[in-house]
Image (spheres, helix red, strand yellow):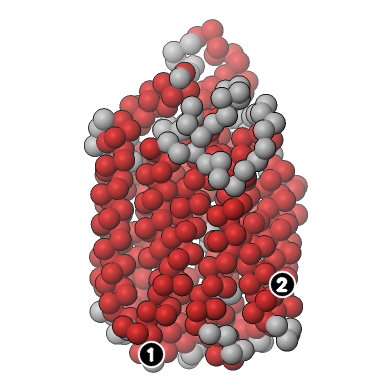
Amino acid sequence: MTGADSSETPTRSPADASSDEANSPESSAESNEETPPKREQWIIVGSVIASTFFVGFGGGVIFPILPNLGVVLGISPFLVGLILSANRFSRLFANAPAGILVDRIGTRKPFIIGLFIQAVATSGYVIAYVSPLPEFWFLSARVVWGLGSALVFATAYTIAADVSDADSRGTSMGVIRGGSIFGFPTGLVIGGVVSEVSGEVAAFVLATAFALVATGLAYRTVPETHVEGTSKSTVKPWDVDTSITSLTVGLVNFTVLFAYIGALFATLVLFLEHHQIGVLGFDAQGTSGIFMAVTVVAAAVFMFVGGYASDRRGSRMPTLLFFLGISFVGFLLLARAGSVATLTVACIFIGAGQGGTSGPLMALLADLTPTERMGRATGTNNVLGDIGGGLGPMVSLPLVEVVGFWPIYAACAIMPVIAGGVLVAGIYTETGQLSPTTETTSRHRASLSDD
């Protein structure tokens, strides 16, 4: 079995037990006992959303502040890009172990520990600002943040897969991902505004407090959902799932995040300064937080819309290809944006494209991945996504100074088109169909578990 230890005993999630009821009457009683009622499922999802919302504030607060601090603190554009990307590079080594831990010990402990690590990392921003070596402390804080977020992402997606079936998985993934990232635009807006009104240190202290609240909330409310594994083999950073499905979904995630996080978020504050665009009386730093928030809110809303639409259609592919097309249009608009109105429309399209892709994409991964490998598959997706999001700022920030903004954004418009081609080719290779239904993917998933 690809990506899984051959000595492991296959495990069963509550969602899998539920899906077998109609085919196995003898197991109905057991399935009903294991499957959480719908009300309990949404309580679990809501608990995860609330916890990740609060910790997400710390992820957003640094984006509208740090690019501008590069000038104030004398940090080069390349080093600023490295700091912004450091969390993604550290996650490259933490994603696979995080996924393995989830498959072996469950979701609750890694989720809570990951949130606490992110709280500690956020406090490092305060030290960085008052330290004579701000580059070291900012970089260290982002590295530690990445280690914590690897645990949080692996557990959040696995919880969503555990408590849902094929008919509701897209909605669950969209809600849990979309709802959780609302903390990020909160950080973008409040980080930009508070830093202008009360200073950068006040913004970082507030972010730390939010992260600690998230940890306490998770400890009190998030239950265990995942079945424990039995393998005791060594946890390795390169032990990821290498199935066609996992690699396909991961490569799509790579291209989308390279453009979305790596290029747009890393360069927006500089774009606003260059075009002298501001809103509500704020300068580029505060304005960038507002535009980023518009983008992320659009993404969060359309994560739910995309997931729900893919559930109702009974197939993920049409929804995924549609929203990849929306992202393409958004970056074309961004390349020619020169006013508040055109930039707002571009940001909404880009956010809608990224968000509408995210929910169905993770649902598709869960549709085609056996339960005992879901943690590893999530690790593969996160590894490739972090490579894209990490390389983006390191490539875009230096190139913007050389070639300007519109060539970079125009190039980013091509990436969703490439992602669509990779998606169609990979899913056809795996299932033999260009647009498999959720019924087809469920049967394929069952055959992989049997193998």
| Residue 194 makes an appearance in the image | yes
Residue at 45%, 39% in the rendered image: 242
Above or below 330: residue 104: above
Q: How many neighbours does mark 1 have within 10 angstroms: few (below 14), some (14-19), or many (20 or more)?
A: few
Left or right: where 327 falls relative to 299: left
Residue at 61%, 25% in the rendered image: 8
Residue at 73%, 57% in the rendered image: 116
- Which mark, residue 16? none
**Residue at image mark 2:** 124
Left or right: where 216 falls relative to 85: right
- Tell me the element at label 2: helix
Three-letter amino acid code of the residue under disc 2: Gly
Quadrant that contains the C terminus: top left
**Residue at image mark 1:** 274
Counting from the top left corner in percent of width and height, residue 362 is at 44, 44
Counting from the top left corner in percent of width and height, residue 58 is at 63, 67
Three-letter amino acid code of the residue under disc 1: His
Counting from the top left corner in percent of width and height, residue 353 is at 34, 59
Residue at 71%, 72% in the rendered image: 124
Counting from the top left corner in percent of width and height, residue 359 is at 42, 48
Tell me which numbered mark, 2 or 1, is placed earlier along the sequence: 2
- Tell me the element at label 1: helix
Above or below 352: residue 7: above
Q: How many neighbours does mark 2 have within 10 angstroms: few (below 14), some (14-19), or many (20 or more)?
A: many
Above or below 211: residue 19: above
Q: Nearer the viewer, residue 400 or 355?
A: 400
Distance between the alpha carbons at the discs numbered 2 and 1 = 31 Å
Q: Point out the residue furthest to the top here.
A: 26
